[in-house]
Image (cartoon, rainbow, N blue to C red):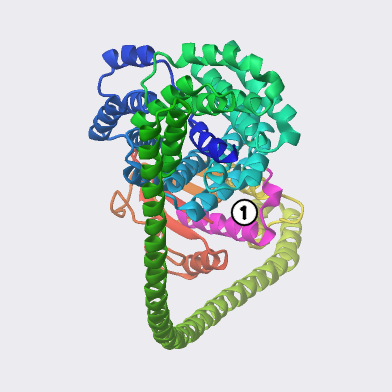
Amino acid sequence: MKRLLLPLLITLMLPPVLAAAQPQADSLRHLLRTQPHNPHLLAQMAQAFSTSCPDSALHYAQLATQHKAQGADIVTLEAARGEALAAQGHIQQALGHFTQAYKVAQKHHLADQQHNQLCSMGICYSRLQQFDQAAKCYDQVIAYATRHHNHQLAFAAYQNYGAMCSRIGRPDDCRTLLLNALKYERAAEPAQRISVYAGLGTILTYNPATFAQAEQYLQRGINLARQAHEPLAEASCLSPLITLLTQQPKRHTEIPALIARANTIVSGLAPGGTERMQLEHAKVNYYFVTRQWAPALQSALMLYHNGPAVSSERDKVMLMVARAYEGTDQAPRACYFYREAYYIADSLHQLNIQQQVADAAARYDAKEKQLKIAQLQKDAAQAEARQWRLGASLAVATLLLIITIAGAIMRHRHQQRKAELEQARRYIDGIETERKRLAQELHDGVCNDLLVAEMQITNTASTAQATQQLNAVRQNIRHISHQLMPPNTAFATLDQTLSALACKLHEMGHIAITFSATPAHHNWAALPAAQAHQLYRIAQELITNLIKHTPQLTHISITLTHSPAAPHTTLTIAHTAATTPAAPSPTAAPSSAGAAPSPASSTPGIGLRSISERVKAISATITHATGPQGQHITTISC
């Protein structure tokens, strides 16, 4: 009995559809009428027809390729080609397309699609009897599906793995895998669930102790098939149920009704269809047990003429025919089929022996070749390692030399820069010290002396003109001392000191001087004190030069700007005059620290040198330009 059940189980486990259900073909056709060259729709059409109409699927896949399908659409059309070719029996070609779909999905990081194709590759390997390769594919898919909670993919992988174990004669492993598949049955389609129920029911018919469980699974599959209106799936459960009840003589009365129901379902199918062959196997088994030789002969001859479900079982089918002829008292025909069955069995035995010898020879040759290849690979690896070590040594030596040279250059530049900055600081510190000393002396000495002289002369009525002159001298000296004194940056921000400078100069002369700072509410106290001090001195020196050396000067504009992007701080001094002396070209190029002198003065002196050194000290840049209204603009950025 077990020998008849195993081929039934092998044909029962059909490969499931791994992709999600495609849109209805009619809907896709309607969309294609409006978008006939859409590669995505063409790929979907190929997928929809992959199993039902393989030729149409291959046609749509070709059209999708011609219209340059990309990305996930390539995965879809390659998978459709694989399924169509598998449905036509071209398993090797189908494997090639599934492999290509797997590579494209891997390239585009489509993990779910990648493992879907890996499961399809496992089905192809199983049909090509490359069971180790198939097992590796299924193990990878199961590991991914359980880790990422992809229940539909996990169900399909367990189902296909169980079918393969059934095919290679491992019923216990098949049962375990199918039970694991049922853990994810909620994610599966009804046809897939029915297939697993039928497989478990068939496996459990091997042991009388599990007959009750087998019947439970088969009845569950039949009920689900009726609810889902899947008559063919119902037939796949009826056949093993008939075989199961055949082994229980007390329940033989239930079998005719099941056979009648199954005959009604498969009557419209081709005689060589899978479901038809499964049913005929079950019926022959029942008729032999109940000694109904005429219907047994009819079913056996149908199996014989239309081919058994598994070609290696042909000798068993011929023995069934011989036994049926013997039961109907047709001894000559029975002898003929017995003799043919034994001939086929002997031939198969001889072929098996020859195949085993050929396999052993092939394994020996392969082992010899593997040893030679391993030796060549070892030699090549050693040579490559030597070349790599030599190249690595040269690269390290070159890198060390480059690092040494670069370090020396950077150190020299750093020292040179440090020396320049130190020299500029010393120069500016000397200027500031000298200014402070002169201011102190002018204020405390000269101004006080002149004040005394003024008071003495005032007492004489004839000296009014001299008194007026002395007063003017004192005011000039006081103005000089105020200019020489350093700005009070400890208690005032840069915008405040520049605003105060503009106000003082405006009050003392006849030139309009304005100051503005943007943005209006910026916190200028965050500006470093050293930078604020130098910018104040630069502005003071530039304005003094303008006042002294620019004829008919009418207006000076001071603008302080902050920007979040570098350069962060910009000081702009623009001036206009009634008659403008010769100036630089309209578009002045920017200069670095210590650039050409301002257009306000063409004579180099201590003032311009001071400006240049101060610009260097704060790593700023100074540029000169002429505006559209004829004004001269000097910009310091840092």
Secondary element at tag 1: helix
- The x and y percentages for residue 188 are 59, 27
Q: Is residue 19 left or right of residue 351?
A: right
Quarter of the rendering containing residue 300? top left
Would you place residue 179 above or below residue 168 in this image?
A: above
Given residues 468 and 234, the one toward you in this image is 234
- The structure residue drawn at horizontal position 62% and vertical position 52%, both measured from the top left corner, is 465
- The structure residue drawn at horizontal position 37% and vertical position 66%, both measured from the top left corner, is 358
Q: Is residue 439 visible?
A: yes
- The structure residue drawn at horizontal position 72% and vertical position 57%, both measured from the top left corner, is 454
Q: Is residue 182 left or right of residue 627?
A: right
Residue identified by numbered label 1: 472
- The x and y percentages for residue 461 are 71, 51
**Segment tinted magenta in the rendering:** 523-547
Would you place residue 300 above or below residue 537 in this image?
A: above
Q: Is residue 287 left or right of residue 526?
A: left
Would you place residue 425 above or below residue 37 in this image?
A: below
Question: Three-letter amino acid code at disc 1?
Answer: Ala
Quadrant of image for the C terminus? bottom right
Quarter of the rendering containing residue 383? bottom left
Q: Is residue 234 one of those drawn in magenta?
A: no
- The x and y percentages for residue 95 are 37, 45
Given residues 467 and 557, the one toward you in this image is 557
- The x and y percentages for residue 126 are 46, 46
Q: Is residue 539 one of those drawn in magenta?
A: yes
Quarter of the rendering containing residue 341? top left
Q: Is residue 554 visible?
A: no
Q: For label 1, count other residues whose C-alpha is less than 10 Å away and answer few (under 14), some (14-19) or many (20+).
A: few
Q: Main secondary structure of the magenta part?
A: helix
